[in-house]
């Protein structure tokens, strides 16, 4: 069974909504950033960051090891408060964000969206806990220091014969528990269904689409917490639209110093624990290292 929750982007009284002005601010910030000269962007090269923050050039990332690189550019950031404070207790993922010079208002617009989306993400954990027969507050003490990576993504259009090994973002599963995704109106995102067919995740104008689909669109941290009761969904993006595309995923995990231990409700004699226990920080970092390994060597 598949559940999907759509959250109206128009401000309302519910605390599940992200005001449209905040979304528009972040999208405009992304447009301004990707319009910078390449040299300004590569000065923030993600390979120079000890915790994978900053700029990824076209083909810099390779989410599917069978592919030759992803045809998008990106800007990655993690938690930071408005005053600029970062945290020291994030284990392997501890470190600062990398902000561009000469883009007034960029940092504020991006962080405004980040904080609003993180708040939304925090409000979803109790629903997952209930779905797993756990107390509603089960994840509360495991999500006190938001371990959330956000990305601004820019996909050029691809035309003619598209090599399946060079697409916008190759087939992959996300590394954290779940993903909140804003995408513009350009169709590119696809989800692999149980029959092995790629299904278009159709953009809906005027909405913030929260990928919130049990058993289908969850990330690998939840697969580890639940011993695969929650299965991560394979997805990819191929932009054949003829126009450029922007998206903003936010990956929401448990705190970086928390161990990804299988839940007692999800293991049994018939279904013993499958995964080695690691901290969320070590896990995310190892996945990012694999994703960027090919371009690190060229660097
Ligand atoms: O751009 C998109 O719609 C998907 C991005 C994505 O899957 C990712 O960054 O993990
Ligand atoms: Fe993804």
Image (tube, rainbow, N blue to C red):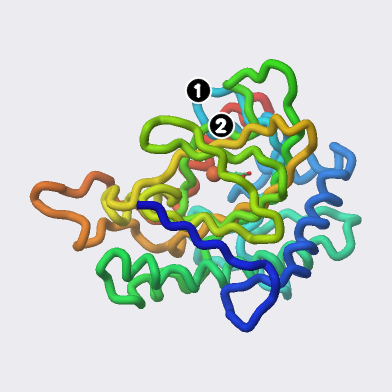
Residue topped by disc 1: 66
Q: In this view, does 242 lie above or below 251?
A: above
* CB atoms of marks 2 and 1 within 8 Å: yes
| Quadrant into which the C terminus falls | top right
The residue at 15%/48% (across/down) is: 272
Residue 263: percent from the left, percent from the top?
Answer: 25, 61
Q: Is mark 2 on a helix, strand or loop?
A: strand
* Quadrant of res 42: top right
The residue at 47%/73% (across/down) is: 144
* Distance between the alpha carbons at the discs numbered 2 and 1: 9 Å
Would residue 110 be found to the left or right of residue 63 on screen?
A: right
* Quadrant of res 238: top right
Task: Spot the residue most to the left.
Answer: 269
Question: Can you tell which of label 2 and label 1 is closer to the viewer?
Answer: 2
Locate ligand 2 by image quadrant.
top right
The residue at 10%/47% (across/down) is: 270
Would residue 237 be found to the left or right of residue 222 on screen?
A: right
């Amino acid at each position: 069974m598949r559940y999907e929750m759509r959250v109206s982007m128009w401000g309302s009284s519910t605390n599940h909504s992200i005001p449209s002005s905040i979304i528009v601010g972040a999208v405009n910030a992304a447009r301004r950033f990707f319009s910078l000269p390449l040299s300004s962007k590569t000065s923030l090269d993600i390979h120079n960051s000890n915790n994978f923050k900053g700029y990824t050039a076209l083909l810099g990332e390779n989410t599917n090891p069978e592919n030759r690189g992803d045809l998008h550019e990106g800007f990655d950031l993690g938690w930071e408060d408005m005053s600029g404070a970062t945290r020291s207790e994030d284990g392997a993922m501890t470190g600062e964000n990398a902000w561009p010079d000469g883009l007034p208002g960029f940092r504020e617009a991006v962080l405004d969206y980040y904080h609003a989306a993180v708040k939304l993400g925090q409000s979803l954990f109790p629903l997952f806990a209930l779905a797993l027969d756990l107390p509603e507050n089960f994840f509360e003490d495991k999500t006190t220091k938001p371990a959330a990576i956000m990305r601004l993504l820019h996909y050029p259009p691809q035309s003619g014969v598209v090599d399946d090994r060079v697409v916008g973002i190759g087939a992959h599963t996300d590394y954290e528990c779940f993903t909140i995704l804003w995408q513009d109106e350009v169709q590119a995102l696809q989800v692999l269904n149980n029959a092995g067919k790629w299904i278009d995740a159709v953009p809906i104008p005027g909405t913030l689409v929260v990928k919130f689909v049990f058993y289908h669109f969850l990330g690998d941290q939840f697969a580890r917490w639940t011993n695969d009761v929650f299965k991560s969904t394979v997805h990819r993006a191929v932009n054949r639209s003829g126009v450029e595309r922007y998206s903003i995923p936010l990956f929401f995990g448990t705190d970086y110093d928390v161990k990804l231990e299988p839940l007692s409700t999800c293991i049994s004699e018939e279904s013993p624990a499958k995964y080695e226990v690691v901290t969320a920080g070590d896990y995310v970092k190892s996945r990012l290292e694999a994703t960027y390994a090919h371009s690190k060597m060229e660097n």
